[in-house]
Image (spheres, helix red, strand yellow):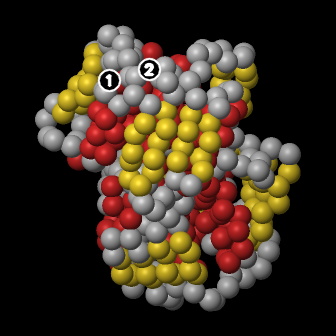
Amino acid sequence: MNLQLHKVENQKIDSEIIISGSKSESNRLLILQQLFPEITIHNLSDSDDSHHLQEALSSEEKVADIGHAGTAMRFLTAFFATQEGEVKILQGSDRMHNRPIEILVNALRDLGADIQYVEKEGYPPLKITGKRLLKNKVSINGNVSSQYISALMLIASSLKNGLEIQLEGKVTSVPYIKMTLALLHQVGVEASFEENIIKIQSKENTTTQDIVVESDWSSASYFYSLIALSEIGSSVKLSAYKKDSLQGDSCLARIYQHFGVTTIFEENSVTLTKEKEHSKAILKEDLKSTPDIAQTIAVTCFGLGVACDLSGLHTLKIKETDRLEALHEELTKLGAEINVTNETLHLKNTERIHKNINISTYNDHRMAMAFAPLALKVPIIILDAEVVTKSYRNFWNDMNKIGIEAVEIK
């Protein structure tokens, strides 16, 4: 499905949007719910990733196919490795079979797991034979996807002797590790994270609990961008959010002040308002802890003619696509002067934006959603627009509500 996007003329942006639960929180809680059935989860993410994870956890089939769901691949690799006597083939899309998983597999093997590569060494698909893991110490590089580390943390309380994880070197994406830690605490697991060492105690059961998932801050980023690109006085109310969020992407409230956007926290919601013109100063941000908002910020800067230097982006190379190269390609088509390295993005201020450009999405939901707000400036075409369902199934409906019309084209 290809969509032509354009601004609805004379429509003031003043809407209220309900966004489903955080994919990151939901997927962690779904694994914990398998270990502690006493947990009931409310406001689960409606993303494809979470649906794939739920299906894999509930299915009795030998083969579990998780499509493009990277989080599900990492979390299920660790989970299935602990399920004694169960044999699973864990597979996904072609892109998933080219996303490395060797670091996590090696760590699990060090704990005694039985995991074999079905095709290419170091990559899915995997054959996992569940075992009782008795070792209680493991080391893993901290400068990798935090999902590897969280995958180990989530299964740790189910191990007879608990688990101590030594993080080697510099640790990136710390907020996601702290999110996992906070959710473990919420379900009653004793756990700590001090000086690159994570310690998690064994636990067999917990008390009956109802847990409400906060809405997804990564999804909120597209509305921050949209308000930043809109006229002064535009606003949108998003629910359900809280000021003391577990999600690192809540730093959007601070970053988007640069673009004239204020954030007002109310009970279970935030209101974003364009109160003044954006700063013309270059935006400099280290996003090593929040890489998922890099695409949104880069497109916002381009749309406003603001230069930016974004760093800490090395994990973007191994996402659904090479997001740095994808940004370089698509922003260049729109008229940007942009340079990328393996971990940085440098954008010069540009006054002119080319119209009616086809934006390729590379099987990456965030490419489609990050570029959508640019339609407030010029008409654009989003190719394979249905890719947004990976994390945000109602995205195009919500864009229509807020002043961007999306028309399917052949």
The residue beneath circle 2 is: 57
Q: Is residue 347 visible?
A: yes
* Image point (58%, 16%), residue name: 204
Amino acid found under the numbered disc labelled 1: Ala
Relative vertical location of residue 191 with respect to residue 361 in this rendering, above or below = above
* Image point (46%, 62%), residue name: 170
Relative vertical location of residue 231 with respect to residue 199 in this rendering, above or below = below
Q: Position of residue 293 (x, y in %)?
A: 53, 61
Relative vertical location of residue 262 with respect to residue 236 in this rendering, above or below = below
Mark 1–mark 2 Cα distance, whole angstroms, equals 9 Å
Q: Which mark is residue 64?
A: 1
Q: Residues within 10 Å of mark 2 (few under 14, many from 20)?
A: some
Most foreground residue, 324 or 150: 150
Most foreground residue, 269 or 233: 269
**Local SS, label 1:** strand
Q: Position of residue 42 (x, y in %)?
A: 68, 27
Most foreground residue, 197 or 350: 197
Give left or right: position of 59 versus 96: right
Amino acid found under the numbered disc labelled 2: Leu
Labels 1 and 2: the sequence-earlier one: 2
Question: Farthest residue toward the right?
Answer: 267
